[in-house]
């Protein structure tokens, strides 16, 4: 039985047991067995499968211009800064985040325009108005377009207004003409670019933190340049992304995207200092060396290593899973969910659509990272273009080892000491095999994949929605 068929029959069972409530065309409809059959049939033979082999093809025009458009946002007058900040865009990445934003934007454009009246859509942005009139104006006060600046350009681009021969900060280029056929708004396309810039900034920083040496089949930024330059290039990308966010001129979207930046840092911090698996607040591990954190009160903090001994094993495991999922949301799903929500906000759609787009991005993001954590146990370096089996070496307890710990409480000690002792990693890996940690992780990811597919049903049927379904399924089945 193929895995798709297996998934579908499981869904069929689940859906036929309970009445599913779906929101279609903004009306709540209660569907039972016939809908369940239809849903499961679509999973076995998604309409998209017959039509598309590649979800990229629907937005291939935008995807092929992505790197070029980003290049126009990140130019500076310093050649080395240009090299480092464009380095990760040169190698082929998965580009899954901008792909989600673009496909979702296209799918949202199929909602009748009369139903997209939550916010006034800028006339120049709607698909039946091909004229896109954004021109950067030095004197612009509060332009509506993605190209307009509010501050005078000589302030934004000059270090010294009298010396503007080769300003360090180059002006951002104008967006190319709006393609009236496609239905994707210029602001949504810019959103896709911003999302990739934020993600890339986080990768530059992440590779410094993880001491990584290869990504996308090439040396990481920290290896090719230096830690210092990689960190600064990440900061620069964030700075430029922030300007582009502000120029979307939508406070709700500005709030959402700024929060994703904070969330990424929070998620990374939760990973760095796992207070559930090692609740010692007084020390931190600094590349193998233990440092004492200066206390705010000046008192010597209480040393309290390990798990809470007052509660039973199952409660500790539950708390660890809760922490892991929260961290995973912040680290990966936040950018996908909040950018999906932002795409829906920009489309002018109603709240029910916005909520489902948010939930779609959240469920897909959780599925994506859980699969990533699983692949770390199953893939080779060559297959994923970066070192595999890295998480245990970094001391990280992800889903596969948490599932093994649930069955084998002794693993708690190894997890608490971040697999630092000789032999810890081997013991942990064989426990994952013994207790089917990888298989259980796959099932967990599958649950989020199915929820994401349900969220998509708020959108009218279209090629773009089918492509999103295909993309969602392929996140679960990917091998790299
Ligand atoms: C990859 O994780 C890393 C992330 C998804 C986020 C990293 C976030 C930060 C470093 C915080 C700073 C954020 C910004 C915006 C500058 P991974 O290490 O599990 O994946 P990998 O194997 O691809 O490295
Ligand atoms: Mg990493």
Image (cartoon, rainbow, N blue to C red):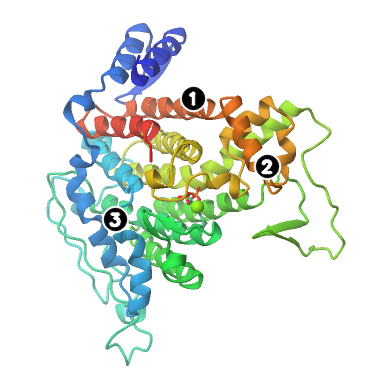
Q: Can residue 144 be seen here?
A: no
Q: Which mark is residue 60?
A: none
> In terms of sequence position, does the residue under pointer 3 or pointer 2 come before the other?
3
Outermost bottom residue: 162
Q: Secondary structure at mark 1?
A: helix
Q: Position of residue 245 (x, y in %)?
A: 37, 59
> Which sits in the foreground, 1 or 345?
1
Side (left or right) of 216 relative to 295:
left
Whether tag 1 and tag 2 are in contact, CB under 8 A, the answer is no
Relative to 387, is 147 above or below? Answer: below
Where in the figure is residue 216, as x and y percent of width and height?
Answer: 36, 53
Which residue bears the numbered disc 3? 190
Left or right? Give the position of 260 relative to 291: left
Kindly report which numbered mark, 3 or 2, lies closer to the viewer in this rendering. 2
The residue mark sitting in front, 3 or 1, is 1
130 to 276, vertically: above or below? below
Q: Return the residue at label 2.
A: 424
Question: Around disc 2, counting alpha carbons within 10 Å, would you say few (fewer than 14), some (14 to 19), or many (20 or more)?
Answer: some
On residue 443, the disc is: 1
Helix, strand or loop under label 2: helix
Q: Residue at x 57, y 33 (%)?
A: 400
Distance from disc 3 to disc 2, alpha carbons, whole Å, reads: 46 Å
């Amino acid at each position: 039985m193929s895995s798709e068929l297996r998934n579908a029959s499981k869904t069929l069972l689940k859906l036929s047991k309970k009445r599913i409530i779906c929101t279609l065309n903004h009306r709540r409809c209660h569907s039972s067995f016939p809908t369940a059959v239809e849903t499961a049939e679509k999973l076995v033979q998604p309409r998209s499968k017959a039509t598309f082999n590649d979800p990229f093809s629907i937005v291939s025009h935008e995807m092929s211009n992505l790197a070029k458009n980003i290049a126009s946002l990140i130019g500076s007058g310093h050649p080395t800064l240009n090299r480092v900040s464009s380095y990760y865009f040169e190698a082929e990445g998965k580009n899954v985040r901008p792909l989600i934003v673009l496909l979702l934007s296209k799918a949202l454009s199929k909602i009748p325009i009369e139903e997209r009246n939550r916010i006034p859509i800028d006339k120049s942005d709607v698909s039946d108005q091909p004229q896109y009139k954004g021109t950067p104006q030095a004197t612009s006060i509060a332009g509506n377009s993605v190209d307009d600046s509010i501050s005078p350009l000589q302030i934004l681009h000059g270090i010294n207004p009298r010396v503007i021969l080769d300003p360090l900060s180059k002006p951002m280029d104008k967006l190319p003409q709006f393609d009236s056929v496609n239905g994707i708004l210029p602001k949504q396309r810019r959103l896709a670019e911003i999302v990739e810039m934020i993600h890339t900034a986080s990768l530059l920083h992440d590779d410094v933190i993880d001491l990584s040496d290869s990504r996308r089949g090439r040396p990481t930024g920290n290896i090719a340049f230096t830690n210092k330059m990689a960190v600064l290039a990440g900061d620069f990308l964030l700075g430029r992304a922030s300007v582009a966010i502000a120029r979307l001129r939508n406070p709700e979207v500005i709030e959402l995207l700024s929060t994703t930046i904070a969330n990424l840092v929070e998620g990374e911090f939760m990973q760095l200092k796992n207070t559930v698996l090692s609740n010692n607040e007084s020390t931190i591990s600094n590349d193998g060396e233990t440092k004492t954190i200066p206390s705010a009160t000046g008192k010597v903090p209480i040393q309290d290593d390990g798990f809470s001994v007052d509660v039973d094993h199952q409660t500790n495991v539950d708390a660890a899973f809760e922490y892991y999922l929260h961290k995973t949301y912040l680290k990966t799903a936040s950018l996908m969910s909040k950018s999906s929500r932002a795409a829906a906000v920009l489309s002018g759609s109603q709240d029910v659509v916005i909520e489902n787009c948010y939930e779609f991005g959240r469920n897909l993001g959780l599925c994506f990272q859980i699969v990533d954590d699983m692949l770390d146990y199953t893939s080779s370096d060559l297959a994923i273009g970066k070192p595999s089996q890295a998480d245990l070496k970094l001391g990280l307890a992800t889903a596969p080892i948490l599932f093994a710990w649930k069955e084998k409480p002794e693993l708690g000690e190894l997890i608490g000491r971040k697999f630092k002792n000789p032999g810890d990693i081997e013991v942990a890996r064989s426990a994952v095999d013994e207790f089917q940690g990888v298989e259980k992780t796959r099932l967990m990811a599958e649950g989020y994949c199915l929820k994401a597919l349900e969220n998509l049903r708020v959108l009218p049927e279209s090629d773009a929605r089918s492509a999103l379904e295909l993309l969602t399924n392929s996140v679960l089945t990917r091998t790299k």
